[in-house]
Image (tube, grey):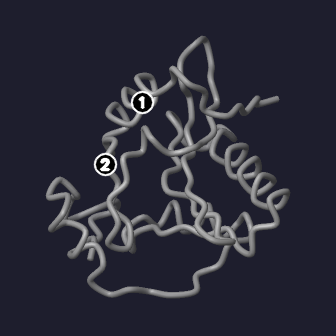
Amino acid sequence: MIEVRAIAPGDERAVAQFLDLAGSGTTVVVHGITFDATTLPGLIVERNGEIDGLLTYGIQGDDFEVVTLQAAERRTGVGAALLAAATEIARKAAERRLWLVTTNDNVDALRFYQRRGLRMVAVAAGAVDQSRKVKPTIPEVGDYGIPAA
């Protein structure tokens, strides 16, 4: 069984290291808002004393937004466990919706989320281009050679 726990005080450095190793870094730009992922509430899966998966989120009004979701290794159940735990937190808090933003080139993530009951509700053409103005390190071409736009 995969155990999920809340990010605790003192985890900031480990969270930052995990995000840096994952290649995403701690700065996240979503729908025009820049987040420092190390300051967000979140959930962690640990193995052998190291972070093996991380989900960060924000709550605004009655919306629960997943800001980051990263597993050290795909298809191990870590991402599913983190998303399930986040869904339970949102449900207990009576949030109206749990939602997130991903990019058009991230087809593995699109499949992952849809298989877990999430659905696409909008496509914002050019959103990645706008985010790239704030965070130039966002790649122009993503998985499978798909341009991130």
Residue 33 occupies quadrant: bottom left
Looking at the image, residue 51 sits to the left or right of residue 126; the answer is: right
Quarter of the N terminus within the rendering: top right
Where does residue 69 sit, x and y in percent of width and height? 53, 49
Q: Which residue is mark 1?
A: 18
Looking at the image, residue 102 sits to the left or right of residue 6; the answer is: left
149 relative to 2, above or below: below
What amino acid does circle 1 point to? Phe
Residue at the spot x=38%, y=31% of the render?
A: 16
Q: Which residue is mark 2?
A: 27
141 relative to 119, above or below: above
What amino acid does circle 2 point to? Thr
Marks 2 and 1 in Cβ contact (< 8 Å):
no
Residue 41 occupies quadrant: top right
Looking at the image, residue 13 sits to the left or right of residue 122; the answer is: left
Where does residue 132 sit, x and y in percent of width and height? 19, 66
Residue at the spot x=58%, y=63% of the render?
A: 65
Residue 3 occupies quadrant: top right
Quarter of the C terminus within the rendering: bottom left
How many numbered marks does the figure carry? 2
Secondary structure of the residue carrying numbered label 2? strand
**Mark nearer the viewer, 2 or 1:** 2
Where does residue 128 sit, x and y in percent of width and height? 28, 72
Q: CA distance from mark 2 to mark 1?
A: 13 Å
Looking at the image, residue 140 sits to the left or right of residue 9; the answer is: left
Q: Residue furthest front?
A: 61
Secondary structure of the residue carrying numbered label 1? helix
Residue at the spot x=76%, y=31% of the render?
A: 2
Reading the chain from its start, which is encountered first: label 2 or label 1? 1
Residue at the spot x=25%, y=68% of the render?
A: 131
77 relative to 87, above or below: above
Identify the disc placed on residue 133.
none
